[in-house]
Amino acid sequence: MSRADEIFIANCKDILENGVWDTDLSVRPHWEDGTPAHTVKKFGIINRYNLQEEFPIQTIRRCAFKSCVDEILWIWQKKSNNIRDLHSHIWDSWADESGSIGKAYGYQLAQKSKYAEGEFDQVDRVLYDLKHNPASRRILTNLYNFSDLHEMHLYPCAYSVTFNVSGDTLNAILNQRSNDMLTANNWNVVQYAVLLVMFAQVSGLKAGELVHVIADAHLYDRHIPILQKVLENEPKKAPKLVVDPTVTNFYDFTVDSFRLEGYEYSPLDAKIPVAI
């Protein structure tokens, strides 16, 4: 069984059996027909994925791997906040007529600050410190800029990453304020596992642990019947992530720099409705 499957199944069963419903509260998300999108949730879930053991992708349902990688490159490499630079439609509901999602995600990573060593944006500062200050306990990024929230079409969900080097190994903590478990949980895990691998490779380090901290891990009411069918699928062995070893510059990675060997999964027949 894939470790990602094992963790996801345990998380979802815990939410279903012990979670708290918000049906007695007024909620912001809604379905396309205008009905409130209520959830059942657990607070404070922490999951650990050791990338030296296996790549954390689910097999009880298909994860759109290439789209995951494309979006993480859109945010962290292109530092874009415009869906015209993205090759999927996952952000369409939050984009304006120009394609912008406001001052969110890639926009925040692109903002530069002055340091003693020069001027860096958030991504380039991480890359600099991993090479020059690997013992630092200050290697992190933060997308939750309160002064710009009113100009973001959606507040960042996965909002902060802390990087930490232990010997020759790079580890990371992904902090997430909110996680739609069926739609986005493994999507985010796969993305940030790939990001950790990228940063490690170009810094001459090994990718180690990804720790995923979720404040509000929830299941939407209309997702539960779909989830229950997914949980009935038989887990399979995790595939192997293969990365182009010739890439030594973070900005040279492309979607085609990554592939999965031996990825077997169960199909997802149902279309998952999106709460907006």
Image (cartoon, helix red, strand yellow):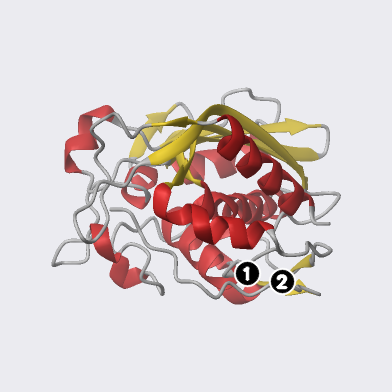
Q: Quadrant of residue 111?
A: top left
Q: Is residue 24 above or below residue 268?
A: above
> Tags 2 and 1 in contact by the CB under 8 Å rule?
yes
Q: Nearer the viewer, residue 123 or 148?
A: 148
Q: Quadrant of residue 163?
A: top right
Q: Is residue 249 visible?
A: no
Q: Label 1 sits on what residue type? A: Arg
Q: Is residue 44 left or right of residue 202?
A: left
* Number of other residues with Cα within 10 Å of mark 2, as a class: few under 14, some 14 to 19, many 20 or more: many
Find residue 161 and name its label.
none
Which residue carries the number 2 mark?
265
Which residue carries the number 1 mark?
62
Query: Residue 165, how many percent across, how many down?
Result: 73, 33
Q: Quadrant of residue 227?
A: bottom right
Q: Is residue 68 left or right of residue 137?
A: left
Q: Label 2 sits on what residue type? A: Tyr
Query: Residue 20, how many percent across, how many down?
Result: 47, 29
